[in-house]
Every structure is written in C-alpha cells, then in structure tokens.
C-alpha cells in the first residue's frame, strides 16, 4: 500500500514511514509516510500561495466541492475498506461514514454566503464574510473521514486553504482522500500530511495558520488552545463528552432499548457524542438494565470486515486497556456486571459491550469519558435529582431525554447544560445544517451549518454614502 501525502497538489513521500496497526489483529498491516518539518513548511507555503486565488472565486469553490462530493461517492468501497482496516468499525458503518463525508461536502457546496446590507440614517454598510487564510486541521481516529469533511468542507467553502493532519492511528483513508481530490482542487488548496508525534505540535506551532480546528481529547485541546494563544489564532475545539441519557418513569424499556443501546455502543462506544451514562427512573431501572444486557450479550462482535459483524474492536490497545481498567475499578467498588465485563482473549483490541449497574456517581466509569464499549446505568428517584447528577460533569456536549410524553421530555431536556439535546433519540441533531458544539470542557466554537461556516470567516465592513448621495 503506497499512499502518499498531498502537498501543493502533488504526491509527497516524506522522510521515512511509521506503522499502522489493524485493531482486529493487533498486528502492523501497513505503513504511512512521516512528514518532516521541512515538508510541513512546504505544505504551509503551498497553502499560502494558493489562498488569494481560491478566496477570490466563490463559484469555483462551490463547483470544486460538488466535484469532491461526487468523487468521494464514487470511491465509497475503497475508502470504507481503508477505514475498517485501520479503525476497526464494521464495513457497513465505514460505508456510512464515507457517505457522510460526501454529504458534508455537498451541503457546504450549496450553502449561500452573500453580503449583508445594513442601511443607516446617513450611510449604507456592506458586511461581507471574508476567509481567514490558511487553516490547520487536526482530526481524530474514531471517524477519520467524516470529521475530516466537517473541517475541509466549511473551511474551503469560506475561501480558506487547508493543511490537514489525521491521527497517526488512522492515516490511510485520509491520505487516500487527499490523493482522490488532488486533481479536483487547485494545487495547495488542500494539503494532507501524516506522521507520529510531534507532527501535531509542529502544525499547531507553525507561524502560518490563522486558525486551528481540532477534534480530540480535552487534555490535548488545552495544549492546542495554549499554543494558539501565543499567536492570537482562532480555534474551534471539539473535545470530549460524558453524555447523559435520562430515562423518565413513563418510558417503555422494551421500546427504547435498541435505540439507547446503539446510541451508546455504535463504533464500539468511540464517539464523543455517545451515551456514556444512563440515569433511569427507579421503577423502570431493572427492566432497562435487563433489556440493554440482552442486546449486549447477543450482538455479533468481530473484525469489521467480516460479514454480519455489528461491533468491531477498540481502535487502539491503549484505549482498550483504559476501558478494561474502568470496568475493573467499578466492579471492585461494588458494581454489578449485567453483560460483558472483561477484555476478550485472543488477538486484536476487542472488548465486549459491557453494561454495569450498581455504580456510584463517584466511580471513574461515571466521572470520566470512557470512549469505549461500557455503559453505567444509575437509578434516580426524581427528575430534579437526575438533572443535577447529569450536569455534575466538566463536560457539556450532548444529552437525551426518553419518555412516553415528548412534551414532558422536551421540558426536561431544555434544562440540561449541554450544546445539543434530543428527545427519544440521541445526537439526533448531528447534521450538516445544524450547529454542533459543547459547553464547558467540551470545547469552544461550533461546527456545521451557517454557524460553523462563520467560524472560518472574519466580518469585513464597508461603510459608504447612499448611491444617490452626491458630494
């Protein structure tokens, strides 16, 4: 597999390579090129040189994004196979991810960005959204292509140029995306560089970018923000979440169990907006635990490329061990394992979907973001208590409320201190046309929709006399 980086519209081999591990086996199955500092300088120079022409022609940008969306759809099978091989998710989920990347490109190609006219008493103001310049984009390993599109599409539509760095755990699909789009975008508009640490630090410390957009852990996000502050750069930081689902006393466990299970365990729980804590009214607690455990015990788990698999491995060995440690600590503290409970024997980074009851609000499996296939279920006695406990976290990304009465659920949902909340679903608002962002330690800024697009622009104000006003 000889994928190359993309710099100034041309292939770039880099200086040496680094290993890429198949999480289904735990073995190295490919290598990727490692970007040295001098190649990163070339990528930044190419993005700088491409910026004036790209920023000038909005219709050309729209056409290029539409062509990019078509190209991604035409390469779904190849891109999905790479995502599954390096990230581990089932092939059907990887296919959905690639299609989502195309949908984001298509959406932003069509979004309108015209000027706003503000008429005053003695003058007229024309407010135009101008691009910022070069954007540095850093993406994580859980959704390598979808989250790349979340950054590429609005940044390019606004008129910026991009230097994109994927996680070193999942570089291959993003390298392939760069190769796919090379001939569809002017040279330097989209540059893709890969490498292990410290490439991310070099990227964020580089003097060229005017904005850094980062998706990843809160700890790394703080370092990105600190580095950005030294040059007064803008940042969008989509960081961690410890998302709560509140199940009210009139909810039917049998009816909601499937949706709630997959809201927690899709992609083996490796989603910032996955359900990571369930607070359930005591009268329906036991029935819900049983329904979730039944599904956990029977869902097919295995290599993502195998037919019929619904849950793949955890992407990295370190994350698998972290999740296993959280489960061990909870059990040692008195939690009951309703399903799952320990990492699978054999090759690969597998951990079965684990449902825990009898946990405490102070257990690490509740207070920390697990980012893996484990779900603690906690009982509550009244809604006020549930709201307080759900909000007792430094995170504030998404949440959900489940009830037979949607109006009642909506009234409860409106009180949660999060960026987005859904009723009788979870993360239902993760769409290209709606803002996505959190509160508190889930990070500043938003992605998607007009709100996300605005984060890649700076208002420019031109004030002039009315057209018929002669000196």
Image (cartoon, rainbow, N blue to C red):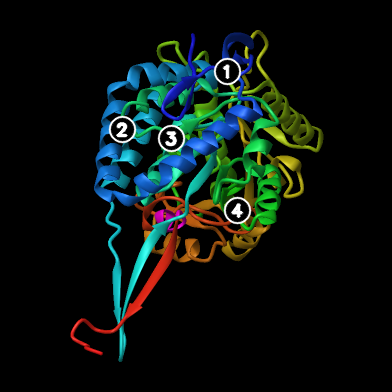
Residue 95 percent location from the top left of the image: 37, 24
Name the residue carrying label 4: 443
Name the one closer to the observer, 201 or 299: 201
- Residue furthest toward the front? 471
Start-end of magenta stretch: 451-456
Which mark is in front, 4 or 3? 3
Checking the image for residue 188, the label placed there is 3
Mark 4 surroundings: few (<14), some (14-19) or many (≥20) residues within 10 A: many
Mark 1 surroundings: few (<14), some (14-19) or many (≥20) residues within 10 A: many
Left or right placement of residue 217 versus residue 448 in this view: right
Name the residue carrying label 1: 33
**Is there a contact, CB below 8 Å, between mark 4 and mark 3?**
no
Choose the circle earlier in sequence order: 3 or 2.
Answer: 2
Secondary structure of the magenta portion, mostly? helix
Residue 323 can be seen in this image: yes
Name the residue carrying label 2: 68
């Amino acid at each position: 597999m000889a994928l190359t980086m993309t710099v100034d519209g041309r292939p770039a081999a880099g200086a040496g390579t680094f290993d890429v591990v198949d999480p289904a086996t735990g073995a190295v199955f490919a290598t990727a090129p490692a970007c040295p500092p001098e190649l990163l300088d070339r990528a930044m120079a190419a993005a700088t040189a491409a910026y004036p022409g790209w920023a000038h022609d909005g219709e050309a940008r729209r056409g290029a994004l539409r062509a990019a969306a078509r190209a991604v759809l035409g390469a779904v099978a190849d891109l999905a196979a790479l995502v599954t091989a390096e990230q581990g998710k089932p092939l059907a989920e990887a296919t959905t991810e690639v299609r989502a990347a195309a949908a984001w490109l298509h959406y932003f190609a069509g979004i309108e960005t015209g000027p706003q006219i503000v008429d005053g008493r003695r003058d007229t103001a024309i407010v135009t959204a101008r691009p910022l310049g070069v954007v540095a984009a850093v993406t994580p390993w859980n959704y390598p292509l979808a989250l790349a599109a979340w950054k590429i599409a609005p940044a390019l539509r606004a008129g910026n140029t991009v230097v994109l760095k994927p996680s070193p755990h999942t570089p291959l699909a993003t390298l392939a995306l760069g190769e796919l789009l090379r001939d569809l975008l002017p040279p330097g508009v989209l540059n893709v560089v890969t490498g292990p640490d410290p490439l991310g630090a070099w990227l964020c410390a580089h003097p060229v970018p005017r904005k850094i957009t980062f998706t990843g852990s809160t700890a790394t996000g703080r370092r990105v923000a600190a580095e950005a502050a030294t040059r007064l750069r803008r940042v969008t930081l989509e960081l961690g979440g410890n998302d709560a689902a509140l199940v009210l006393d009139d909810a039917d466990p049998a009816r909601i169990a499937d949706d709630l299970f997959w809201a927690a365990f899709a992609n083996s729980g490796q989603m910032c907006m996955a359900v990571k804590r369930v607070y359930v009214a005591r009268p329906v607690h036991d029935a819900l635990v049983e329904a979730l455990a039944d599904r956990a015990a029977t869902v097919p788990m295995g290599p993502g490329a195998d037919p019929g698999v619904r849950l793949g491995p955890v992407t990295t060995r370190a994350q698998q061990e972290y999740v296993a440690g959280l489960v061990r600590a909870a059990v040692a503290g008195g939690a009951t394992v309703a399903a799952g409970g320990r990492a699978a024997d054999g090759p690969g980074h597998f951990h079965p979907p684990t449902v825990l009851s009898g946990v405490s609000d102070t257990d690490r499996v509740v207070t920390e973001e697990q980012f893996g296939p484990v779900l603690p279920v906690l009982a509550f006695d009244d809604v006020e208590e549930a709201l307080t406990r759900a909000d007792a976290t430094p995170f504030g990304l998404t949440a959900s409320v489940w009830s037979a009465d949607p109006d009642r659920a909506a009234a409860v949902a409106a009180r949660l201190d999060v960026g987005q909340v859904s009723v009788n679903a979870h993360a239902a608002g993760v769409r290209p046309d709606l803002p996505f962002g959190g509160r508190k330690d889930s990070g500043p800024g938003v992605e998607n929709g007009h709100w996300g697009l605005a984060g890649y622009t700076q208002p420019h104000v031109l004030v002039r006399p009315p057209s018929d006003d002669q000196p």
